[in-house]
Amino acid sequence: MGKIKEEFMRLQETPVMDDCPQCNGAGEVDADYHMSHNTNRDVGFIETRVEECDMCNGSGEMERLCNCGEWITLIRGEGSYVCEECADE
């Protein structure tokens, strides 16, 4: 297979990645936990912990998706927001 064809195949299979909207690309989010003093009282405090982002699984990046739900690949370009199938329509 030629180098140009290999590059086209790679661009068609690699999705454009954006920062995760939940963690803004950090991969971690602050989570609040309500801690009670004991079981007989309704007072307590809120403890904040750093957890792995559920939306991106800690990577900080997500695939850019078209309105139809398909990935937008690098062959369409970094600034594209429409997949190949929707662009052809």
Image: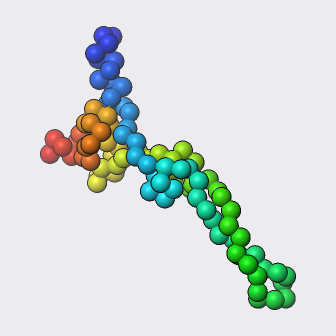
User: Horizontally, is 64 left or right of 44 in the view?
Assistant: left
Q: Say which residue appears at 76% left-offset and 82% top-offset.
A: 44
Q: Quadrant of residue 34?
A: bottom right
Residue 38 appears in the figure: yes
What is the x, y in percent for residue 58? 57, 48
Vertical comparison of 33 with 78: above or below: below
Residue in the picture at 32% in, 12% down: 3
- Dividing the picture into quadrants, the one containing residue 41 is bottom right
Q: Which corner quadrant of the image does residue 59 belong to?
A: top right
Q: Tell me how the rendering is colored.
A: rainbow
Does 49 sit above or below residue 83? below
Q: Residue furthest left?
A: 89
Q: Looking at this rendering, what residue extends furthest in the top direction? A: 2
Pick the residue in front: 52 or 48.
Answer: 48
Q: Nearer the viewer, residue 62 or 43?
A: 43
Q: Residue at x 26, y 42 (%)?
A: 79
Answer left or right for 39 relative to 88. right
Point 18% across, 43% down: residue: 87
Residue 73 appears left or right of 89: right
Q: Nearer the viewer, residue 88 or 31?
A: 31
Q: Quadrant of the C terminus?
A: top left
Q: Position of residue 78 (x, y in %)?
A: 30, 39
In the image, residue 37 above or below residue 3? below
**Residue 5 x/y as whole percent:** 29, 17
Q: Is residue 70 or residue 80 the one in the foreground?
A: 80
Decide: is 46 above or below 67.
below
For the N terminus, give its image quadrant: top left
